[in-house]
Amino acid sequence: MRTARLLSVMAIGVAAATVLGFGTSASAVTPATSGDSSPSAGHVVVDGHRVVTGTTIGEWGKATDGKLYSFTYKAGEARPAAPAAPAAARCSVYISDVSFHGAGASAYFQWETSQACSGSYGSQKLQTQMWRSSWSGPRGYNDWHGTGLTSSSFIDYGWSTDCNDGGGTYTYYPVMQGYASGIGWGPKTRSDNELRKGCGTRSPNP
């Protein structure tokens, strides 16, 4: 059985038990080559990384006057105006569409998350969770899973969680939240899509 886990697509030194054995899904974010002023069709460059056009981007940060701000927009659309005071530190987060693979006891959800930070911050990390529908609103389908703190300006991770096949039909989608020291936690950002599947109320490996 697969457990909910991450696959680092930047670092190789991840414990074998935590690495997805089947590779990554198509990433919503890939590094842009030097001087890439005309990215391939269907992509735009955001914060130095090629992003699928239409992907929801969440930006959050702290201005030099100490005020926090956040907003979301779609890759390829005009970025909303920043606060009047310049940003002392800012981060952008991206979450891919969720995909579904396999069948029966081997079925699982898969998605990717990325975060880019700049300015006066010490380190960054991110966390993610699969949510599902319920009569009283969204509920966590698995536990929150996160990365360790890193001083890198860009992190990109792939994730998966098992489907409890036959446990009841609900709507599922992942959310993510970024953190940077000196700014704090950003707002939760969800995938642009959602999947209607018979995977029950709780992942078998949360």
Image: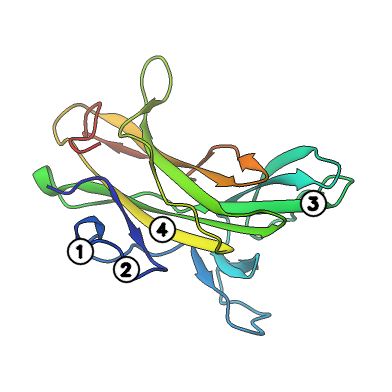
Query: Amino acid under label 1?
Result: Gly
Q: Hey, which residue is sitting farthest bottom in the picture?
A: 35
Badge 4 is on which residue?
157
Mark 4–mark 1 Cα distance, whole angstroms, equals: 14 Å
Residue found 27% across the figure and 66% down from its top? 23
- Mark on residue 58? none
Badge 3 is on which residue?
87
Mark 2–mark 1 Cα distance, whole angstroms, equals: 14 Å
Q: Name the image quarter holding residue 151.
A: bottom right
* Pair 2/1: label in front: 2
| Secondary structure category for the residue under label 4 | strand
* Pair 2/3: label in front: 2
Vertical placement of residue 74 versus 11, above or below: above
Mark 4: few/some/many CA within 10 Å (<14, 14-19, 20+) = many
Q: Along the polypeptide, which appears first: circle 4 or circle 1? A: 1
Question: Is 194 situated left or right of 83 in this image?
Answer: left
Badge 1 is on which residue?
21
Q: Name the image quarter holding residue 199.
A: top left
Mark 1–mark 3 Cα distance, whole angstroms, equals: 40 Å
In this view, the residue in front, 164 or 4, is: 4
Query: Amino acid under label 2?
Result: Gly
Residue 193 in sight from this viewpoint: no
Q: Along the polypeptide, which appears first: circle 2 or circle 1? A: 2
- The answer to whether the residues at label 3 and label 4 have Cβ atoms under 8 Å apart is no
Q: Along the polypeptide, which appears first: circle 1 or circle 3? A: 1
